[in-house]
Amino acid sequence: MTREILANAENRYEVTRHDLPLSCPMPGMSKWNSHPRVFLPIAETGEEKCPYCGAVYVLVREAGDAVA
């Protein structure tokens, strides 16, 4: 069973390459009280801030990820 993520409940989210392309709110987040979906270019920067809610997303490495 997939756990629902509460939209805008956190200030910082750690995401992996599996979550790309990244949007806020992310799939699996409750959308009934959220803002319009916006895509964030986190693959280029490694960290992005949502212009709507201010949530910070940080791209974390997983085992097997290529070293940049």
Image (cartoon, rainbow, N blue to C red):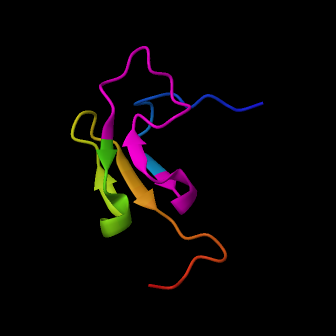
Furthest residue to the front? 21
> Is 5 placed above or below 42 here?
above
Whether residue 65 is visible? yes
- Residue at left offset 71%, top offset 32%: 2
- Which quarter of the figure is the N terminus placed in? top right
Question: Would you say 49 lies left or right of 22 here?
Answer: left
Please give left or right for residue 63 compared with residue 21 in the image: right
Q: Which residue is the extreme one toward the top?
A: 32
Q: Eyeballing the image, is 10 above or below 29?
A: below
Secondary structure that dominates the magenta span: loop
> Residue 66, located in which quarter of the rendered image?
bottom right
Quick check: 55 above or below 65?
Answer: above
| Residue 32 figure quarter | top left
Place of residue 12 in the rendered image (x, y in percent of width and height, measured from the top left): 42, 48
> Which residue is farthest bottom?
67
Q: Residue at x 31, y 50 (%)?
A: 40
Seen as rendered, the residue at the extreme left is: 51
Q: Which quarter of the picture shows residue 43? A: bottom left
Q: Position of residue 13 (x, y in %)?
A: 46, 48
Give the residue displayed 28% in from the left and 43% down from the top: 50
Give the percent coordinates (x, y) of residue 36. Answer: 30, 26
Quadrant of the frame with the C terminus: bottom left
Q: Is residue 36 magenta?
A: yes
Please give the range of residues in magenta.
Answer: 14-38
Where residue 16 appears, x then y in whole percent? 54, 59
* 26 or 60, nearer to the observer: 26
| Residue at 66% over, 74% down | 63
